[in-house]
Amino acid sequence: MENFKDKIDNIYANQIENRSLISALTIEERKAYLRKLKTSILNHREEIEQALFLDLRKSKIEADSTEIFPVLSEIRLFLRKLNKWSKVKTVQNNLLFFGSTAQIQPEPLGNCLIISPWNYPFQLSIIHLIACIAAGNSAILKPSEFTPNVTAVLEKIISDVFPTNYVALIDGSVEETTYLLTKKFNHIHFTGSPKVGKIVMEAGAKYLASVTLELGGKSPLIIDGTLPMQEVVEKAVWGKLINFGQTCIAPDYILIKEEFQQEFIETFSKHIEKVFGNDLSKSNDLARIINLTNFKRLKNLIDDAISKGANCPFGNQYLENELYIKPTLLTNVSYDALINEEEIFGAIFPIYAFKEINEVIEFINLKEKPLALYILSNNKNFITQIKTKTSSGAVVINETLVHILHPNLPFGGVNNSGIGASTGYEGFKDFSHLKPILKVNRLLSPSKFLNFPYKPITQKVVDF
Ligand code: NAD
């Protein structure tokens, strides 16, 4: 049997050999592949939904709306815009370049590696692949080992649409990824945790591959009590409970003005039971924790916080065999609790009460820069202060999560929550080199004007 190293070596060598042919694909040929990809996704739609149910117990509607639909709409966007985005753009000259032609030509980067996580295993594998091939690259895709059913469907779709010397999938875990990362890629696109992001960036540094990192972090949800509490709770619950809290941009914790904390807890408890039923574990609309390791990690976060003095006004009930923890609220959380440090990635909401806005700003700025920052407020001055005195991948006012759907906003983090941006035009640029091409007018060359570089630089030029 072929071992994984031989398999990776073969695929990698074939993609390198095929590189010039892939780079030379016309825009229409790239678009034809996107259309084939779309058809194959539609043909496998039920299988994708089933796989997402088996791996994460996602409901059909959640699978459609958060995994399949975003991918199809991304293909549609690329089909509509690719001609425009990939066109050579002529830029303006200044006086020095009068008569020259200055252009920017997007060119493919070459051989790319895309590594994806388990939480949106279909969407986050395909959405970056779309940008990658639209920009004229080849790809090796390495999905997460924790969603084997989705990987099996991804494998079918990819082999249905692409030859392996163009796009190939490697099914594997840390060992396989570590081996892939020894190879010289032109670009690596990684979605996952900051911890592994650092490993990926170090591997990219060896060959100076460009690296895009879509990471995670602790995204705050700030509530100052100026919006109706029912609206606040609905937005908090929706943002947290999609995929059972396992969303990179899920609000991680709540900062709430002290006098509104009790009202929040009461409204939250009523709302959540109204929406999901008295026994939340029986709801078909809640996904499940990915595996036992994460179940134990989340349980430990709750136990640790409670052992350090936190109160738990809602939740803290478990069904281990179902990988279920009832959505949980924690108040009075000690600063040295583990939950205050690590990304929760589960349906637990620690609530921190504040008196003054400065406490909010200080609390956020003491942590790593988050991927998203949510403000539910009607107070302009409050919003402005938070926006300008903190740093985050994105700021969303009056909602949670929805910025990811905006076609013209870049999606990405900053420092610990990510480097670079993805999807839409940003995705296309991410997988392209925007190459400047300057054709100088021989009669009006800047070198003549400046007496440079054919003669020594005169004092006159330096003074210029
Ligand atoms: P992860 O970092 O553990 O794994 C991501 C990928 O890296 C997987 O394919 C895995 O096989 C591989 N990997 C794991 N350990 C590795 C190692 N030591 N060496 C090489 N490769 C390794 O992340 P995860 O648990 O799959 O996903 C959760 C994380 O991803 C969270 O932090 C979440 O916020 C983040 N995330 C970010 C985005 C975004 O777009 N910014 C989207 C989804 C998830």
Image: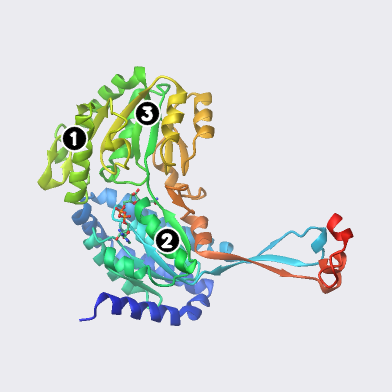
User: How far apart, in angstroms, are the residues tagged by discs 2 and 3?
Assistant: 35 Å
The residue tagged with tag 3: helix, strand or loop?
strand
Residue at the disc numbered 2: 202
The residue tagged with tag 1: helix, strand or loop?
helix
Query: Given the image, on which type of amino acid does mark 3 rest?
Result: Leu
Of the residues under marks 1 and 3, which one precedes in the sequence? Answer: 3
The residue tagged with tag 2: helix, strand or loop?
helix
Q: Quadrant of the C terminus?
A: bottom right
Residue at the disc numbered 3: 255
Q: Can you say whether 17 is above or below 139 in the image?
A: below
Kindly report which numbered mark, 2 or 1, lies closer to the viewer in this rendering: 2
Q: Residue furthest top?
A: 259
Kindly report which numbered mark, 1 or 3, lies closer to the viewer in this rendering: 1
User: How far apart, in angstroms, are the residues tagged by discs 1 and 3?
Assistant: 21 Å
Of the residues under marks 2 and 3, which one precedes in the sequence? Answer: 2
Disc 2 under 8 Å from ligand 1? The reply is no
Q: Is residue 394 visible?
A: yes
Instruction: Residue at 16%, 43% (x, y): give it.
Output: 324
Disc 3 under 8 Å from ligand 1? The reply is no
Residue at the disc numbered 1: 303
Where residue 412 appears, as percent x and y from the top left, is 46, 50
Query: Given the image, on which type of amino acid does mark 1 rest?
Result: Asp
Q: Quadrant of residue 117?
A: bottom left
